[in-house]
Image (tube, rainbow, N blue to C red):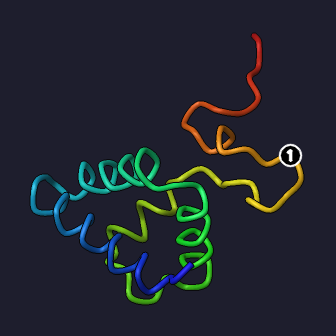
Amino acid sequence: MNVEHLVTMANQIGAFFVSQSDREAAINAIADHLRRFWEPRMRQAILRHVAAGGQGLREEVAEAVRRLAPLPDATAPGASPADNEPGAGPTTSG
């Protein structure tokens, strides 16, 4: 996966949302867009890029990526795309 291409796409998404709303709403909208429309391996790659410093990413985009839930390694046995959906994961009863 070409991380430079992902950075470019993420920055374009970020530029759109930043121009449409305040910073906090933009960050939330960017994170939501990445969760909904990027496939798990794209999210994994951009998460790794941010963990390595996030070179080239807009500040708002880097923050949005940090807000994504940690994703399981896509190559790990038992990893499933459903694991990456919002609300997926263990539940607790009270």
Looking at the rendered image, the quarter that the C terminus falls into is top right
Q: Is residue 30 left or right of residue 88?
A: left
16, above or below 91, in the image:
below
Between 15 and 67, the one nearer to me in the picture: 15
Between 91 and 1, the one nearer to me in the picture: 1
53, above or below 32, in the image:
below
Looking at the rendered image, the quarter that the N terminus falls into is bottom right
Q: Residue at x 59, y 55 (%)?
A: 40
**Residue 59 pos. (x, y %):** 34, 75
Q: Is residue 11 left or right of residue 35?
A: left
Given the image, on which type of amino acid does mark 1 rest? Gly
Q: Residue at x 54, y 85 (%)?
A: 53
Q: Residue at x 33, y 55 (%)?
A: 30
Q: Residue at x 69, y 41 (%)?
A: 83
Residue 80, picture quadrant: top right
**Residue 68 pos. (x, y %):** 53, 53
How packed mark 1 is, by other alpha carbons closer than 10 Å (few <14, some 14-19, many 20 or more), is few
**Residue 25 pos. (x, y %):** 24, 48
Q: Residue furthest left?
A: 20
Read off the residue under disc 1.
78
Element under disc 1:
loop
Q: Residue furthest right?
A: 77
**Residue 22 pos. (x, y %):** 16, 54
